[in-house]
Amino acid sequence: FFFKQKTAYEIYQCDWSSDVCSSDLNERLTEQGFAGTLWIMMMNGGVATLKDAGRAPVFQLVSGPVGGVSGSVKLAQEIEEPNLLCIDVGGTSTDVAAVIGAATPLTDLWTLETGLTLTMPLVEVESIGSGAGSIIQANALGALAVGPTSAGSNPGPVCYMRGGDQATLTDACAALGILQPDLFAGGSIQLDVDAAVSALGRAGERWGMTSAEVADAAFEIACQEIGRAHV
């Protein structure tokens, strides 16, 4: 059964990976003056050449967050701080990992968002539904929750002024002053804090909460979920 699952994922990823491997990527890099070797990040924390990565594309899954953990392991060794908590807050989820003894945390069990568990060697990274774009909404019990639904990059948080109308964790951080409009993204993205506050106020009507209370509660919930993932 495992091999059928793995084969299915190999086939799913093969079209994309084959396109990349058979493209003129290396040629275009060379034209741009790149004289090095192109390495592809793999889920076990290592790297592979473009050709080798194309032979087993399934091992490129979750390699993005894994790269961050590998970098953190190197940092732990260089600064002589063996134990680090790694947090990667993305748009739809937050990836967390614990580096203990300046060693790469490894596992051979990986559960997809769909609940499917695969036995594959990879760096142990856990994803939770508290990303920057996670929408502040009611859970199954009617209580305030952060995610798992996300506003994504389009339209994104309300404060991005791209058409979003549902309050997100980013809006909460903007309202709390954690995100500073003058410094955010080097000024390339303007934040509308007032719009974020208004959206938070609308979200809070369900629970009779003010915008400030909703922002504070959402931020606290997100922090607690990240903390629990590290336990």
Image (spheres, rainbow, N blue to C red):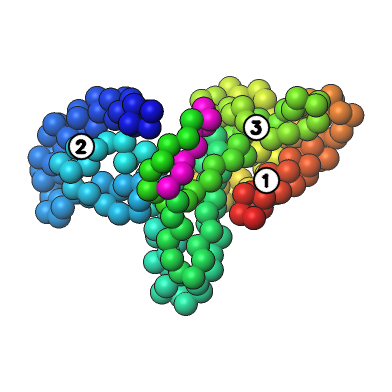
Instruction: Depth check: give the residue in front, 115 or 159.
Output: 115
Is the residue marked by circle 2 packed among few (<14), some (14-19), or many (20+) residues within 10 Å? Answer: many
Residue 22: give x, y in percent of width and height.
Answer: 13, 31
The residue tagged 2 is 54
Amino acid at dot 1: Glu
Residue 111: give x, y in percent of width and height.
Answer: 49, 37
Secondary structure at badge 2 equals helix
**Where, by quadrant of the figure, is residue 27 drawn?**
top left
The residue tagged 1 is 225
**Lateral position of residue 198 relative to residue 174, left or right:** right
The residue tagged 3 is 147
Instruction: Depth check: give the residue in front, 17 or 56.
Output: 56
Tell me which numbered mark, 2 or 3, is placed earlier along the sequence: 2
The residue at the point 62 percent across, 39 percent down is 130
**Lateral position of residue 56 relative to residue 150, left or right:** left
Give the residues in magenta.
108-115
Secondary structure at badge 3 equals strand
